Image (spheres, rainbow, N blue to C red):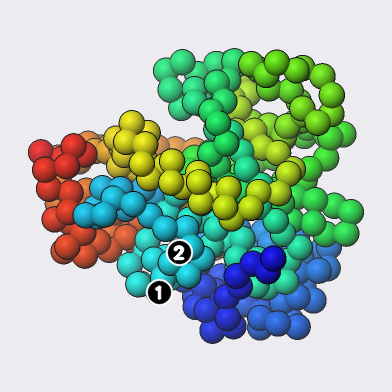
Amino acid sequence: MERPTYTAAQLHAYYERISLPRPWRLEPGKDSRTAAQDPRRGLKFLTALQQSQLVSVPFENLGFHYSTQRTVSIDPLDIYEKIIGRGQGRGGHCMEANGLFGTVLRSLGFDVYPVCGRVNATASSSEIGPHPQFRGWNHMLHIVTFGTARYVVDVGFGFPEMTRPLALDQSSTTPVTIVASQLGRLRRDFIPHTIRQSGSEQLLWIYETRNALADDKLWIPSYCFTELEFLPADFKMMNFFVCNSLDLFFHTDVICFRYLSEDDEIVGSAHLSNQRLRLYKRGTKLVDTILQTECDRVRALAKHFNVDLTDEEQTAIESHRTEIR
């Protein structure tokens, strides 16, 4: 079954939307396919696309709060219209951001397919520690192949998001710098709480991060993922769960995140969580403030995330449980 692709005009609009550096704005078709299928050039092209989208397209759940429908579509054309067509600077949750990214990669000629992950429920809670609590399958990401080499790419997780393709190499767990002092690595292992702790079919890739400046040197699993390809129908069911499970953080918290860059280098990050706004640059916290009103939050979204909510969207949060009162 063929998967949807974007037209050349849509891909050029995507280049513009993510402010892709000019040398990588390859003409869709023969030029992009030639680059995407070359191991060295293709990896550089992939990295440029990933980093540019991470800076320009926020990980956000605003559609569950600043909307009367409080639901999102992961149809490739709907995602394109929301993130690119409307011109509002919008992003989305993992299946929106990675759904867009996967369709773009496929359209440009990359050998790419979607896989699924289990997010560690304790990675960002007060219970953080070495013993993860992996949820059910709930996260989309992609595997890209160049010859015999395979890489995982992700543009829809939030912090600490991987900022470059990571090689699926069991012989190495060498950390890479994600941003500033934040390190990331992959390892392949069994996860806790599974009945069977043997057999290669039970092994999963685990994406872990740690702060290089922290005293405890503790590696925190962000999520684990499989190499098995997941189908559009699988993600449709997951998105239905996300849209209708009102106790998930997508519905209880207003979230927006993006990386910040200077001269095409990722140097920091912007975080909005409910009323709290934080900005970091090269490991230093520049801003940590509590927004007092809805107007403050709307202005922060526009200033720091380039998200321009319509008047209708702004009024849709009135009387909702996440409205700042």
Location of mark 2 (residue): 79
> Which numbered circle lies on residue 85?
1
**Quadrant location of the C terminus in the rendered image:** top left
- Image quarter of the N terminus: bottom right
Asked if the residue at tag 2 contacts the one at tag 1, i.e. Cβ–Cβ closer than 8 Å, the answer is: no
Q: Disc 2 on helix, strand or loop?
A: helix
Residue 193 in the image: state x and y as whole percent: 64, 16
Q: How many marks?
A: 2
- Identified at 14% across, 51% down, the residue is 295
Amino acid beneath label 1: Gly
Q: Secondary structure at mark 1?
A: helix
Measured as percent of width and height from the top left, residue 228 is found at: 73, 44
Residue pictured at 21% horizontal, 65% vertical: 310
Residue 169 position in % (x across, y down): 83, 40
171 relative to 230 in the view: left or right: right
Where residue 308 sits, quadrant-wise, is: bottom left
Residue 273 in sight from this viewpoint: no
Circle 2: is it few (<14), some (14-19), or many (20+) Cα within 10 Å?
Answer: many
Q: Is residue 42 left or right of residue 127?
A: right
Question: As shown in the figure, which amino acid type bears the numbered disc 2?
Answer: Ile
Please tell me whether mark 1 or mark 2 is closer to you in this view.
2
